[in-house]
């Protein structure tokens, strides 16, 4: 009984120590590499979704002639232009056209951004050929596979976080287990002492019973 209690106590203490070491390691902040990330938007920076992507493009007369759907990048990942959908504006056929970034005039007045393409007259829009891609766009299957991978990664990360949370919450349980092991050890020690005393008492009684009865006194 004593050996069992000691074994439980030893295992419990070992598990508690391992859990504390793992928790300490998990809570250490990751080292952030220098020159890779931005802390926030600076005065000389702009976000494509705020300024270009989805923006309505107007001609010199202020009429909407299309909207920006995508960005055109070069090999150095620099923006060279935008892909604009005319959407049938000004009687032009619905098509996508490529526009150089330098041709766009971007102005900001009273907190409202306006994108203008002064050279985009009705005749020019009609004469333009649709923008030709060098590579086909992603297929529905490709997008579905990417989405499935994204969901799988999120599920794996969520499961990892849940495991970490459960491990952190198990700290009090480990403490209780350690206390329970200590109590079990004390009870086991007490029970062993009582059993020993009872055993001694039983042996004593057995020895007394085994002694021969005294011979009757002779008259």
Image (cartoon, rainbow, N blue to C red):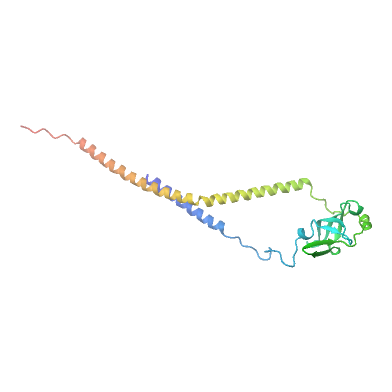
Residue visible at 53% across and 52% down in the picture: 168
Image: 33 above or below 149: below
Residue 75 position (above or below residue 219): below
Check the picture and name the quadrant holding the C terminus.
top left
Q: Quadrant of the N terminus?
A: top left
Left or right for 63, reference 34? right
Q: Position of residue 13 (x, y in %)?
A: 45, 52
Q: Is residue 91 left or right of residue 40?
A: right
Residue 14, percent across and down?
47, 52
- In the image, residue 68 sits, relative to residue 210, either above or below, namely below
Relative to 17, 120 lies left or right: right
Residue farthest to the left? Answer: 219
Q: Residue furthest bottom?
A: 44
Q: Nearer the viewer, residue 142 or 126?
A: 126
Q: Position of residue 125 (x, y in %)?
A: 91, 56
Residue at horizontal 60 percent and vertical 50 percent from the top: 160
Residue drawn at 20 percent across, 38 percent down = 208
- The residue at 31%/45% (across/down) is 193
Give coordinates of residue 152: x percent, y percent: 67, 47
């Amino acid at each position: 009984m004593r050996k069992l209690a000691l074994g439980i106590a030893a295992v419990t203490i070992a598990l508690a120590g391992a859990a504390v070491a793992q928790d300490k390691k998990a809570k250490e902040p990751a080292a952030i590499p220098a020159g890779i990330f931005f802390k926030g938007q600076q005065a000389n920076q702009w976000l494509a979704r705020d300024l270009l992507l989805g923006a309505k493009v107007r001609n010199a007369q202020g009429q909407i002639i299309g909207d920006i759907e995508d960005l055109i990048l070069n090999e150095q990942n620099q923006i060279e232009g935008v892909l604009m959908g005319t959407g049938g504006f000004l009687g032009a056929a619905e098509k996508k056209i490529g526009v150089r970034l330098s041709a766009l005039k971007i102005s900001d007045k009273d907190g409202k951004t306006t994108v203008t393409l002064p050279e985009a007259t009705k005749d020019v829009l009609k004469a333009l050929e649709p923008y030709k891609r060098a590579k086909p766009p992603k297929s529905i299957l490709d997008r579905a596979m990417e989405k499935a991978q994204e969901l799988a990664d999120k599920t794996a990360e969520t499961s990892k976080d849940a495991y970490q949370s459960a491990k952190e919450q198990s700290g009090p349980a480990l403490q209780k287990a350690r206390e329970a092991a200590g109590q079990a050890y004390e009870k086991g020690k007490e029970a062993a002492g009582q059993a020993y005393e009872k055993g001694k008492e039983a042996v004593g009684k057995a020895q007394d019973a085994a002694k021969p009865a005294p011979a009757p006194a002779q008259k």
